[in-house]
Amino acid sequence: MNLAGFRTELHAWLGEHHQELAPRFSPPGTLDERIAQMQRVKSVLFEAGWMRFGWPERVGGRGGSPMLRTELGAALAARELADPGLFSLIEVLAPTLIDFARPELAAEVVPRLLSGDEIWCQGFSEPGTGSDLASLRCRAVPDGDPSTTSAWVINGQKVWTSLAQYAERCVLLTRTGTGDSRHRGITAFFVDMDTPGITVTPLEMLNGEREFAEVFFDDVTVPADRMLGELHGGWNVAMSILPYERSSCFWQRIAYLYRRLEMLVEVAPEDDRSAEVVAEAFLALHMLRARSRVTQHRLADGATLGAETSIDKVLVATAEQLVYDAVRRLLPGVVEVDDSLAGAAWRSEYLYSRAATIYGGTAEVQRNIIARRLLNLGSDE
Amino acid sequence: MDAAERALLEETVRDAIVAGRDPRASAGVDDVLAGLGWHEMLHAEDRDPVDIVFRALGATNAMSSALDDVVVSALGVEPRPDLAVLLPPFTAWGAPGSADGDGIVATGVATARVASAAELLVVCSAGAEIHVAGVRPSVLDVTPVRGIDPDAALQTVRVEDGAATSAIDPAAWDSAVAAGRSAVAYQVAGACNAMLALAREHALARIQFDRPIARFQAVRHRLANALVGVEALEATLVAAADEPSMLTTALAKAVAGRTALTVGAECQQVLAGIGFTTDHPFHRLLKRTMVLDGILGSADAITLDVGRQLLADRRVPTLIDL
């Protein structure tokens, strides 16, 4: 099916099934409500087949270009049927299993993620490991000889783990090399979150929500056949996520930001100051959407995405903050003192948008990468 | 056009423009472009020639009257080297003239071609209609603009004439504005790339505190910001070429103006003292982009217009799809 045809049919179907899919709470809803909504939507869409497009047949998909699933995520975001930040986590989890897990394991578990039966999380960051992922310390040691061991024992701590308290599984990065082995001594595992020794402590963000958690691993035993990729090959696993995170996930976020700007435009005063503020955000969104479109066409044409996606990352962070800055400027007091549901939603999203220049690699790290890798300015040491 | 053909044309056009710009050359930039078959290229559906020629003009800081040809062609008139067109006044984009049956009154700007052209096309609003007139040079009041960038050779033109006008498709002026904006946006992109290349070169060569200033993160981040701007502009040009419309070309033109400001400011700061002198070529690129921003609608004017439209419609269109 071509992309335009898919889009048309998808929107027609979503239109017909709006009643069934729409949230049964008034936005924004609690995190519990939004997660339940997302899982319900996934389940309906998996049953109807939409959720299977763009995923390989060997994990229960219907094949086709990954752009099909990007279109689905964007449509759900634009129609406010699923929170794009939560929904697009699939894009940074499922491909890892598809590319690096034993085929039987991938075939068993990926459909559970797609169908909304399960939630997974990603255990990458640590208290001492923010922008510098290669310094991670959560340790996995073999229960015997590393080449023949049937299990690994994990000790350490993760942080900023989205949805860990809801998750059935975790894609976890561990240190298997020496303490100073950096990216050469990291190994990935697929861990069941109900394994004894795992403790999850949710963290409250500045908007009052508990989307992230700290996860503690205390002598957690993981079967050796849950290793993802090669021993010490975890850096490749981590890096393989980047193309999805910086293409499909962004496109979904972009769809959501267009809708948010439209919600502002629906209520903003009709004067020239509003016109300028709104148009600046619109310009930033257009640049971002145009750039992301180019990136996704390159990916679909077989290019390997790398450092140039740092440009996309800078643009998405800039546009997101401009949209919410526009909200705060054109709806005075809404973010600060409006206790209506709409006010609560804008406030929560405004505060969340401040993290756009922090998560997924800070704006400064992106500029370092752009300077070194794209502008070839050489080392900064 | 495949990648190899495109690369060859890019090189040929750039070499020809550099040769034509030399004051000792017998043929000017317009002549060398005509010699390369520029007018024939405009006939093709292919947008690449406009992209290539205007980027090269921007990168080499050359000025030509190729914009007249692009606008004339979009008006449905055969472009020729002795036919100029009246562009709207600086920062504006409405039809530059008004016609009332007895004749026309128009004010606008024109490229250097107006001085030697046999005819100036003037698009006029005539009530609800759009008219066009071919005006003889003898009735034109032409004043060269010196301003910030005399080398741009812009001319202020006033027309008051009893010329006969004929009605054209009202959409033709919109098409002409869109085509002209795309061309100018490519030219700005060429200049932005050139400014960044100069600043990058300087950062790697300039030694302070015993090291190239390119090692300082503050300098690196300025150049990174400039590259983000350039790449975003390039993407909006792709979007405008793939989904041409009044709005996608307006946005490309607005992004071009905004990007030139960002790139200009970041690069000027990196170039520091040398970039503040006329010994270094940077100042010409900076000034040229400021002038180009005012042709067929400045970034500020377009942005305000787009914002008013969004508020009037209470809608935010996504414009481009995957």
Image (cartoon, helix red, strand yellow):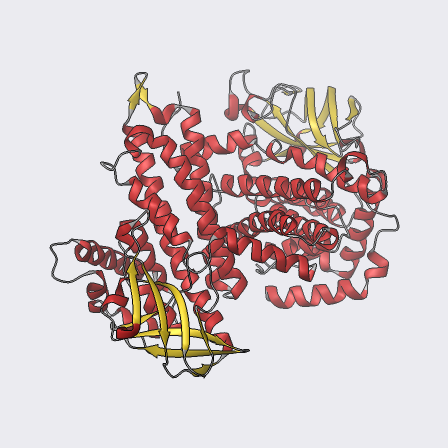
Q: State the residue at coordinates (44%, 35%).
A: B224
Judge whether residue A102 can be spotted in this image. Answer: no
* Residue closer to the observer: A257 or A60: A257
Query: Residue B169 location in percent, x, y?
Result: 49, 80
Q: Height in image: B136 above or below A165?
A: below
Q: Residue at x 69, y 47 (%)?
A: A107
Decide which of A354, B282 is in the foreground and name it. B282
What is the quadrant of residue B37 in the picture? Answer: bottom left
Closer-to-camera residue (B150/A55): B150
> Along the horizontal axis of the image, is B1 left or right of A266?
left
Q: Is residue B188 above or below residue B158?
A: above
Q: Is residue B12 visible?
A: yes
Q: Is A108 left, or right, of B195 in this rendering?
A: right
Number of numbered discs: 0
- In this view, the residue farthest toward the right is A24
In the figure, B132 relative to B217: above or below? below
Front residue of this view, candidates A380 and A127 = A380
Tell me the quadrant of the picture where the N terminus of chain B can be found. bottom left
**Picture quarter with the C terminus of chain B:** bottom right
Residue A297: image location, x then y, percent: 51, 55
Residue B64 point in image, percent of width and height: 27, 60
* Residue B257 falls left or right of residue B65: right
Q: Position of residue A48 (x, y in %)?
A: 77, 61
Q: Residue at x 30, y 33 (%)?
A: B276
